[in-house]
Image (cartoon, grey):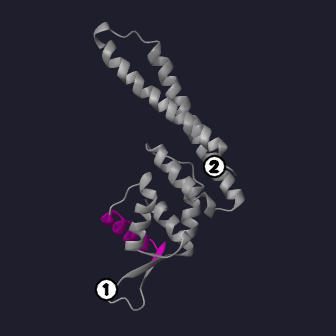
Amino acid sequence: MKYVVLGLLMIQPLSLYDLHKAFRAGISLFYSASFGSLQRSLSQLIEEGLVVAEPEPGDPRGKKRHTITDAGRIAWRDGMLTPPVGADAETVMLSRVFFLGLLDADDRKVAVGLLRSRAADDLANLQAVAVELDSAEIPADLAGVFKYQRATLDYGIRSHTLAQTWLNELPE
């Protein structure tokens, strides 16, 4: 969530309420966040010196506007240019693509290359599992179970194939 919040703050300073609204307006399609998790993330980013919070002028409720710092911009860029890791590859991929337009052309090319590499590696791993499973002897009493487990693997292969195709079609 750290890099998604930083990415939104790269676009413009936001209050906690506006940040939550930005998530609901589009990012929630691939990355969900509660009000409380956003509040914790902002607190951590402030503690790390990546974001500053200043009171909104004239707001009687003490609303604060959060602004990314130079260190936050560097951390965000470094995050975009680091090979993606973690189990939820689709969320990582979509959140990075969402913010690609904030990178310069050279950095964007590197970031897309990293995403393409991850998609290709993940697809190759799933295809290797399929080859191994398809050559395995399945006991007759487990054939019904295997059929749906194999269908789940097939979904993963298809979705990763689509992701790879989509990434290859992205403009650099």
Question: Looking at this rendering, what residue extends furthest in the front direction?
Answer: 25
Q: Nearer the viewer, residue 153 or 162?
A: 162
Q: Which residues are magenta?
A: 35-52
Where residue 92 sits in the image (x, y, percent)?
A: 49, 50
Q: Secondary structure at mark 1?
A: loop
Looking at the picture, how far across and down is residue 9, in whole percent? 50, 70
Q: Which residue bears the numbered disc 1? A: 61
Name the residue: 46% across, 49% down.
91
> Label 2 sits on what residue type?
Val
Q: Is residue 2 above or below residue 11?
A: above
Compared with residue 116, is residue 70 higher up or lower down, i.e. above or below? below
Q: Quadrant of the N terminus?
A: bottom left
Q: Work out whether residue 47 can be spotted.
A: no
Question: To which quarter of the image does residue 19 belong?
Answer: bottom left
Which residue type carries mark 1? Arg
Q: Residue furthest bottom?
A: 58
Residue 112: which numbered mark, if any? 2
Q: Main secondary structure of the magenta part?
A: helix
